[in-house]
Amino acid sequence: MTAHTENEIVIDAPFTYVWTRTNDVAAWPDLFSEYAEAEILSHEGSTVTFRLAMHPDEKGRVWSWVSERTTDLASRTVRARRVETGPFEFMNIFWQYEELGPEQTRMRWVQDFRMKPDAPVDDEGMRHRINGNSKVQLQLIKDRLEARRTRAVHITDVKADNRRGGDLRTLLTPGSVGTTDGFCGMVLLGPGEAVAEHYHPYSQEYLVVVDGELRIDLDGVPHVVRADEALLVPRNVRHRVVNENGAPARGVFFLSPLAPRPDLGHVDTETREEAAAKVVRELVDR
């Protein structure tokens, strides 16, 4: 016989946000109340192997185990299993996500398991425990995810993206707060730095300079944008962002609508190194 449990909850948040946040295993201690630590052991393709450690029990013991988890975005499902089974003969977990609307997602957990003959609890006892705890954790996840959508995101909450030059931080995104119509962030450029030329086939970009001065090259034509000024970058227009002054500069960007595929969101037309070399040549030629 195999013991079986099923539990689900509806979260008032977009699918992409729920999927991204609940599949970030390293951040599970901030999402679940039962886990003290989640250590990623390996990550290959869509499969992650990790160790979970619980908070100490009433006797001070810390229980931990290794699990394996494979996501399938196309089917919006996840399959997981305990590698170190502990008191279980096996433990298999199935996660299913259903988009009920632009701002609502159903998340369903299915667990199939069997206890070892010498386990301290039998199948029925564990089924009862899992059912009770699943309801608690699902409600906690719902409450935390919904609350985080309206929490301010600080620039230090986001890792810098330096791939195209400068320091770019995307702050409000589908994954961070569940935006559905666009995303925004901040770009910081030191003197002589540049963001490599690129264009957006699907989205318009709105750029506001809040500190310093930036030069925005639109299809090769320079436009100087000073603090408290804004510039529209239309779709399919190549643009490069340059700080050609002696002081740091900072701008806020917003792109809308969201591209349905990555290749429609951003197309590079030069490398970070090419952009940096171009700026150096310009400064030397002055």
Image (tube, grey):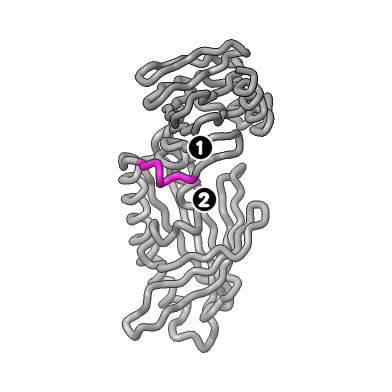
Quadrant for residue 274, please give it.
top right
Query: Which element is circle 1 on?
Result: strand
Q: Residue furthest top?
A: 221
Give the residues in magenta.
Answer: 153-159
Q: Which mark is residue 167?
A: 1
Q: Residue at x 42, y 57 (%)?
A: 7
Percent across and percent down for residue 194 are 56, 28
Q: Residue at x 40, y 41 (%)?
A: 155
Q: Residue 14, position in %: x, y?
A: 43, 38
- Between 146 and 193, the residue placed more toward the observer is 193
Specify the quadrant that holds the N terminus.
Answer: bottom right
Camera-side mark, 1 or 2: 1
Question: Against 162, is 116 above or below?
Answer: below
Extreme residue toward the bottom, this view? 118
**Residue 261 on the magenta segment:** no
In the image, residue 60 sits, relative to residue 92, either above or below, namely: below
